[in-house]
Image (tube, rainbow, N blue to C red):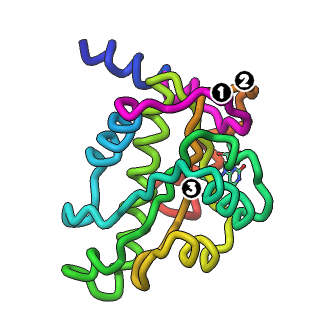
Amino acid sequence: MVALEYDTLSGVMHRRRSVRRYSRETISEALLDKLLKAAQLAPSAGNLQARDFIVVRDPNMKHTLAEAAYGQFFVAMAPVVLVGCANIARSRIAYGQRAELYAIQDVTIAASYIQLAAEALGVATCWIGAFDEKRVSSSLQIPIDIRPILMLPVGYAEEAPEPTVRMGLSRFTHQELWSS
Ligand SMILES: Cc1cc2nc3c(=O)[nH]c(=O)nc-3n(C[C@H](O)[C@H](O)[C@H](O)COP(=O)(O)O)c2cc1C
């Protein structure tokens, strides 16, 4: 049973790709709900869940986000764009100097959960980290102490990208010490 579950998870992880072309088909509320529930299940520092997601469906706003992402206009093609934010204010309730670092980790792991849930549900995403943060914050009226960290366009894939290359385990694994 355990091995079977791993095979399923491994299949999802292997199949996931960054997809940059989406069909016009909409994303249902039920599916979106599942994605957000996946984010809800992610671990977080002190269980403070210092991450928020803004669900953007408005075409004009999606266009603004694509512009803010330095002209990555495929972002606007997706029916839904999730903007993942680090809620530093919430993290600060328990953490001082490390609040920002933890909030960023909270939103990134939640986004990873969303990406895998999306793959399992047959929808595609692409992590967008390159954007003008100030422009995204002002466009979405994000308060000070909350930082937009990533965007996830979500849609049905209209391309099937080849897997991207990964470095071998020995290149990024160190035994006991960095130097070995
Ligand atoms: C932190 C981060 C930032 C990224 N930013 C962008 C981006 O701005 N635009 C984009 O098209 N892809 C972006 N990606 C997706 C990567 O290009 C992609 O994950 C990588 O090439 C591996 O391909 P794969 O996701 O298909 O396995 C980003 C991924 C991460 C994790």
Q: Name the amino acid type tagged 1.
A: Ala
Q: Position of residue 36 (x, y in %)?
A: 35, 44
From the image, tell me which residue sits under label 2. Answer: 160
Residue that mark 1 sits on? 157
First in residue order: circle 3 vs circle 2 = 3
Residue range (magenta):
12-31
Neighbours of disc 2 within 10 Å: few (<14), some (14-19), many (20+): few
Left or right of 72 in this view: 39: left
Can you give x and y, in whole percent of width and height, for residue 133 in the image?
61, 74
Q: In terms of secondary structure, where does tag 2 sit?
A: loop
Q: Given the image, on which type of amino acid does mark 2 rest? A: Ala
Q: Amino acid at mark 3?
A: Met
Q: Quadrant of the N terminus?
A: top left
In the picture, which quadrant includes the C terminus?
Answer: bottom right
Q: Which residue is mark 3?
A: 151
Tell me: is circle 2 under 8 Å from ligand 1. no
Residue drawn at (69%, 42%) of the image: 77
At x 33% / y 12%, what residue is drawn?
Answer: 4
Image point (56%, 55%), residue name = 151
Q: Is residue 151 magenta?
A: no
Asked if residue 22 lies in the magenta stretch, the reply is yes
**Foreground of the two, 135 or 3:** 135
From this view, report whether residue 114 is shown above or below residue 142: above
Q: How many marks?
A: 3
Q: Position of residue 171 (x, y in %)?
A: 65, 48
Q: Magenta: predominant secondary structure element?
A: loop
Which numbered mark, 3 or 2, is in the foreground of this view? 3
Please provide percent x and percent y for residue 68.
70, 67
Residues tagged 2 and 1 counted as in contact (Cβ below 8 A): yes
Give the alpha-carbon distance from disc 3 to disc 2, as whole Å: 21 Å
- Whether residue 67 sits left or right of residue 168 in the image: it is right
Distance from disc 2 to disc 1, alpha carbons, whole Å, reads 7 Å
